[in-house]
Image (tube, grey):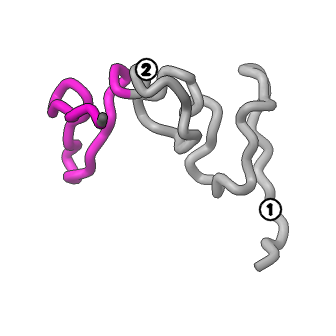
């Protein structure tokens, strides 16, 4: 059975009209989707650089002290 989401408890709409899931929602979900969510309780969003495409990052292998290395080479398509 799918749980019905409650506005302002499980999610809210930001000033751009986008749905933002709360930390409560993510915690109850039980796992990280690795999308860099604003309220990620798994701290994934603190490990990614929004200026770098996600395909070029692996935030799970970086420590808190490491800086993100920005790839500045060609992208194979």
Residue with the mark numbered 1: 72
Residue with the mark numbered 2: 27
Q: Is residue 40 left or right of residue 62?
A: left
Give how far across and how far down residue 33 sits, in percent: 54, 39
Which portion, as a residue range, is magenta?
A: 2-25
Residue at the image position 29 percent from the left and 36 percent from the top: 2
Among numbered discs 1 and 2, the one appearing first in the sequence: 2
Report the disc number at residue 31.
none
- Identify whether 62 is placed above or below 54: above
- Identify whether 51 is placed above or below 46: below
- Identify whether 27 is placed above or below 46: above
Q: Quadrant of residue 46?
A: top right
State the residue in front, 52 or 37.
Answer: 37
Instruction: Label 1: state its secondary structure.
Output: loop
Q: Where, quadrant-wise, is the C terminus in this rendering? A: bottom right
Q: Quadrant of residue 53?
A: bottom right
Give how far across and how far down residue 69 sits, in percent: 79, 44
Q: CA distance from mark 1 to mark 2?
A: 35 Å
Residue at the image position 56 percent from the left and 24 percent from the top: 43
């Amino acid at each position: 059975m799918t749980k019905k989401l409650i506005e302002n408890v499980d999610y809210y709409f930001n000033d751009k009209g986008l749905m933002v899931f709360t930390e409560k929602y993510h915690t109850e979900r039980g796992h990280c989707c690795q999308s860099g969510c604003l309220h990620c309780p798994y701290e994934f969003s603190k490990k990614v650089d929004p200026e770098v495409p996600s395909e070029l990052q692996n935030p799970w292998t970086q420590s808190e002290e490491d800086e993100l290395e920005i790839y500045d080479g060609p992208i194979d398509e």
